[in-house]
Amino acid sequence: MRKVKIICIEYILWLYALACASWLINKLFELSIPGIAVLVAPFVVAVTVSFLRGSVGDKLAPGRDDNDVRRHNLWKYETAIGIILSLVMGWVIVEVKPIAFFTQANNTYSIVSGLFNPNPAQLVPMLNALIETIFLALLATVFAIPFAFFLSFFAAKNLMYDTLHGRIIYIFIRTISTVFRSIEAIVWAIVFCVWVGIGPFAGMLALWIHSIASLIKLYSEQIENIDPGPVEAIRATGASTLQIWRYAVAPQILAPYLAFTIYRWDINVRMATIVGFVGGGGIGLALYQQQQMLAWRNVGLIVWLIALVVWVMDMFSGYIREKLVTN
């Protein structure tokens, strides 16, 4: 069985390597390798490598004899091949153009000059949009806290994996939160702009959904890292699940929860700028409008205001987190 696992691991590795090489050859030299060869050749290599010591499959498959020091360097070469092919693939796919980067900077002169010469005449209306952004992010964070706090207990493996129905709930909550978190806030903003109309309310709902999913992950992982001693002690007294959560889990997580929440507000202030690009309100909408009109001095003012608020929020959240840790 271990030999099969090694072959499977090696096959996946070499299939990836040969697929990358095939794509690069086709892209750079317009030569095509038959698909059947791409599928079969890695299997032949995998079977051959499986008889050698120190391959990637040999190191990853369970049951390896760590005392065997013979020929344990093959995995380094296999890993190097995978990394190099990945970097080359990335370079080609992204179409990296270092010459253009260093020789065409003058094309951005009007933009850069506007960024460093902001228009103070637009300060008042932009401050209004900035205040809207701050409170948009604040409400999204505050409204997300109770949902994330409650659901995080069901997403903690150490609390839910003792029973079958607990495992089902754990997997369900984790899956839903992962899906919602993987969908960017800007996509949620598009959905809610259609749902409730363009404006800050749509932006707040987008950040609210994303914040719930993100905080569930942060909160639940904090629960999974608590000291199990108090939990076991209170469980031994015959306490109910809610009592265990209340008296053994909650006291250990309140301070980290507060730090995570403040950090999430910091993130939401920055993300509120992005959701504004699709109609989510706040200063992001103003930034999009000014950029469309090529009013780069106004854009410069907005950028500096955003940077100032993010800096203040970063200093504030860092100070709070430091106090929580030291206390």
Image (cartoon, rainbow, N blue to C red):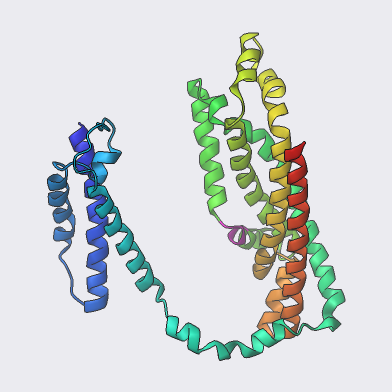
Q: What residue is shown at x 77% (from left), y 82% (from top)?
A: 118
Q: Which image quadrant for residue 272?
A: bottom right
Q: Position of residue 291 (x, y in %)?
A: 67, 81
Magenta run includes residue 187: yes
Image quarter where the N terminus lies is: top left
For residue 196, side relative to residue 236 (left or right): right
Residue 179 location in percent, x, y? 52, 48
**In the rendered image, the vertical position of residue 123 relative to residue 21, given as above or below:** below
Quadrant of the snapshot with the C terminus: top right
Residue 5 image offset from top left, x and y in percent: 23, 37
The x and y percentages for residue 256 are 69, 38
Look at the image and tell me whether residue 9 can be seen.
no
Residue range highlighted in magenta: 184-188
Q: Is residue 152 magenta?
A: no
The residue lying at 26 percent from left, 45 percent from top is: 56
Res 287 seen here: yes
Is 248 displayed left or right of 23 in the figure?
A: right
